[in-house]
Image: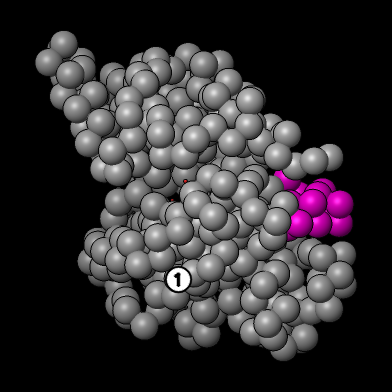
Amino acid sequence: MEVTAIKDFEARLARFPRLGLARLPTPLEPLERLTQALGGPRLWVKREDMTGNGFGGNKLRKLDVLLQEALRQGADTLVSGGVVQSNSQRQVAAAAAKLGLDCHLAVYHGRLSPPTPEYERSGNALLNRLFGATLHDVPWTGDRNAAIEALCAELQAQGRRPYLVPYGASNALGAVAYAATALEIAVQAGELGFHPAAIVHCSGSAATQAGLVVGARACLPQTRIVGIDIDAEPERVRADVLRYAEGAAELLQTPFSEADVEVVAGHAGPAYGVPHEATIEAIKLAGRLEALVLDPVYSGKGLAGLIALVRAGRWRRDDDVVFLHTGGSPALFAYQSALDI
Ligand SMILES: Cc1ncc(COP(=O)(O)O)c(C=O)c1O
């Protein structure tokens, strides 16, 4: 059943061409020392931090499909946005540099107070400038896309041909792009001789989880997708996962069930972008035991959630669980003084 299901899903995904900016498939590797330290289950990591261009990350996989559409439409400018240390907008800036497009970013201030002195200039903020993006400082109002849309309209009025990449590169098409990750894991895990009980990852603007849920239903029906809320808004994250998953399932013409959506609350720390003790512990463990570079906003909180679930006995020792490393490593440098190392 699996080979036929995989071939069928592959054919559905092929209807949504990729640009080829992302280096795929990303590796799936064992985490032997972390597994040993936690006492099981057997942990693996899917290296979505290694998608390539401009330090990579999970958004590049979505952009690979979205930007194919942008070029088809004849866009000359990419427009997006995010908070100062957004990995999403940094990946948009990197893609624009590679494609020779202009890039304008709405940089939101005020969603969180700068947690370190280096927050405003280092990490992703530095890379946005390095990649040549034009940055527009705007206040955070709670509406993730309003300032991006306004910027897009402004550029259009100036005669540009802008393409809008939504906050977090999340929409139904982004979820379609991400569904390919589940297929990759199915193939790689099959070659490695295991079947994942779960794939655990951090969830924010939600298309990553939406894609995984739709892809797993097709290629890994026994695998639970577990999203760790890092926005401290689990109900909003869940609603967005549902919305994008429904949209992606419709585009791909595949089944999808609401029961497949699990968003775990309680690991976001005090607020979005503010690391807590469990995040710092997870970042240090991953670095010391596996040379994995996690960040304090996303992947560090994702691993903190996974560790808490392991300690609570969610899986058996002989289960296999995949941690999806969604990237974000550059943000670590913007939080250097919060790490106390
Ligand atoms: C490093 C990293 N991991 C995870 C996520 C969450 O992915 P999504 O927004 O698709 O839920 C993001 C999104 O901003 C991110 O930058």
Which quadrant holds residue 51? top right
Query: Which residue is drawn at the image coordinates 41% and 39% (left, top)?
Result: 111
Query: Which residue is drawn at the image coordinates 35% and 49% (left, top)?
Result: 170
Task: Indicate yes or no whether the magenta region holds residue 288.
Answer: yes
In this figure, which residue is indicated by the disc labeled 1? 263
Determine crowd level at label 1: few under 14, some 14-19, many 20+ residues with C-alpha closer than 10 A: many
Q: Is residue 40 above or below residue 282?
A: below
Q: Is mark 1 within 8 Å of ligand 1?
A: no
Query: Which residue is drawn at the image coordinates 86% and 52% (left, top)?
Result: 288
What stretch of residues is rendered in magenta?
281-293
Q: Nearer the viewer, residue 24 or 337?
A: 337
> In the rendering, at what x and y percent does residue 83 appear?
44, 35
Asked whether, in this view, residue 185 is left or right of residue 292, the answer is left
Task: Indicate yes or no whether the magenta region holds residue 252.
Answer: no
Secondary structure, mark 1, is: strand
Q: Give the overall secondary structure of the magenta segment.
A: helix
Asked whether, in this view, residue 98 is left or right of residue 319, the answer is left
Query: Which residue is drawn at the image coordinates 32% and 29% (left, top)?
Result: 139
> In the rendering, at what x and y percent does residue 175 appear?
36, 56
